[in-house]
Image (cartoon, helix red, strand yellow):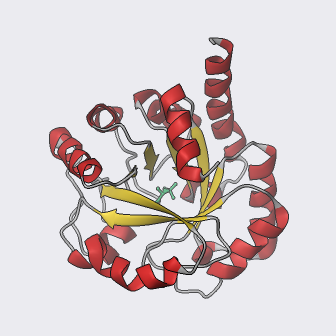
Amino acid sequence: MKILESLTEKSKLGKKSIAVLIDPDKIEDSSKLRHLINLANENCVDYFLVGGSLVTSTNLSEVIAHIKESVTIPVLIFPGSSIQIDPGADAILFLSLISGRNPDLLIGQHVIAAPILKNANLEIIPTGYLLINSGKTTSVAYISNTTPIPDDKYSLAACTALAGEMLGLKLMYLDAGSGAEKEISSRMISAIRKSIKTPLVVGGGINTPRKALNALEAGADMIVIGNALEKEPNLLIEISEKVYDWNQAIEASK
Ligand code: 1GP
């Protein structure tokens, strides 16, 4: 089953997924990467996201190859720009930054990437990407040259996601930005959840099992954890347990 199809099916059943985000720039040595890959595998992580708003190193392909050699967990590219494409991955989140008004990230980079992607044999997942203000300026807000949606403008965010869905985007990604001081609030997640039917991905600043559970309860179909694992990889054990328990409870209630 394709990745989007699987996420959509799971969303309809109320089941949740967890993804580990790996920023190739932050991989100091391959033993750390190996440890994280093994932990993800042992703890039933659903996906790896690879990419970042500023990938300065050239090891995107190496990181993807390393994951693919080691485990069967699907790898999704989470691109900061059109140069972050690697045919070794399984899919790419074809992100349109719909919370911003930077034409390059709404359609420009996509035009450059389209002919490359046509030959890359990657599953292309049309994704509406919404940045929500999280306190201090994040790398993604700075690099994208866009203003995140204020964190108390619930209906503005909900209408943005709704417009994205009407334009045909198949997945919505609600992001506070990597290492965000404040994760996205339950109220914001739930406002967006109510406005759209597509699967909803939530990330940015999720660094405790409680925050992960809050996002799931508010309506996230998939949570993304990156920064917190760079500091403390074993946190993945407790966070993934929340997702596992949630899905077990759904199975048990059938
Ligand atoms: C960032 O949503 C991702 O774009 C994950 O955020 O690195 O803070 O977990 P963290």
Residue 141 on image: x %, y % = 31, 68
State the quadrant of the C terminus. Answer: top right
Number of numbered labels in the structure image? 0
Decide which of 137, 171 is in the foreground and name it.
Answer: 171
Relative height, residue 57 to residue 206 (above, below):
below
Q: Name the spot of residue 227 as percent of width and height, x first.
A: 55, 59
Which residue lies most toward the top here? 253
Relative vertical location of residue 163 with respect to residue 53 in this rendering, above or below: above
Coordinates of residue 105 in the picture (x, y in percent): 30, 74
Which residue corresponds to the image point at 30% horizontal and 38% vertical from the top-left?
196
Horizontal side of 188 relative to 41 (left or right) equals: left
Frontmost residue, 194 versus 240: 194
Residue 98: % across, % down: 26, 60
Q: Is residue 95 above or below residue 117?
A: above
Side (left or right) of 33 relative to 218: right
Question: Residue 69 is drawn in which quadrant?
Answer: bottom right
Residue under the point 72% across and 41% down: 237
> At x 46% / y 31%, what residue is drawn?
214
User: As rendered, which of 67 and 235 lies closer to the eye?
Assistant: 67
Residue depicted at 20% across the width and 39% down the height: 154
Is residue 119 visible in the rendered image? The answer is yes
> Can residue 14 be seen by looking at this rendering?
no
